[in-house]
Amino acid sequence: MANDASQIATFRRSAAQCFYGIIALALVTFVCVRLKPDLVTMAFIYLAVIMLLSLIGSYVVSVVFTILSVAAATRRREMAPKPGLASAANSSTMAPGPIGEWA
């Protein structure tokens, strides 16, 4: 009976860490999407959150959050517009005036 109570307490601690971790990573991801920092800044913020979460929980859950944060950072980087493409689209040399002006 005591063993069951210990397993339930361990499960509750792991569930609480997962809940807090998901909330923290979602909040950091939301802030990073709104502020659009560069990849290094975003990775440092994720690292700080994971380090704080690892203080209250287990190694396995921290590894899972590390994998999730790398996936989020990679996905965010893939979704970012490419600087060369944006400058080319806004360049006046790419869209000259009417052809009649050339003559």
Image: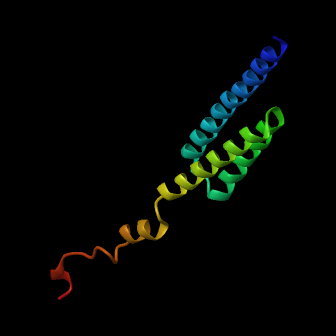
Give the position of the N terminus as an image quadrant: top right
Q: Nearer the viewer, residue 34 or 15?
A: 15
x 62%, y 57%: residue: 38
Indicate the position of residue 17 as horizontal and vertical percent values.
Answer: 72, 29
Q: How is the image coloured?
A: rainbow
x 68%, y 58%: residue: 40
Q: Nearer the viewer, residue 1 or 32?
A: 1
Q: Is residue 90 left or right of residue 16?
A: left
Indicate the position of residue 57 as horizontal and vertical percent values.
Answer: 79, 33
Q: Residue furthest bottom?
A: 103
Where 78 sits versus 32, above or below?
A: below
x 67%, y 43%: residue: 64
Indicate the position of residue 67 as horizontal and vertical percent values.
Answer: 65, 48
Q: Residue furthest top?
A: 1
Q: Nearer the viewer, residue 11 or 37?
A: 11
Where 102 sits versus 90, above or below?
A: below
Count the marks: how many? 0
Q: Residue furthest left?
A: 100
Where 62 sits versus 17, above or below?
A: below
Picture quadrant of residue 93:
bottom left
Q: Is residue 57 left or right of residue 84?
A: right
Give the position of the C terminus as an image quadrant: bottom left
Q: Is residue 103 left or right of residue 65?
A: left
x 73%, y 28%: residue: 14
Picture quadrant of residue 65:
top right
Indicate the position of residue 35 as horizontal and vertical percent values.
Answer: 58, 46
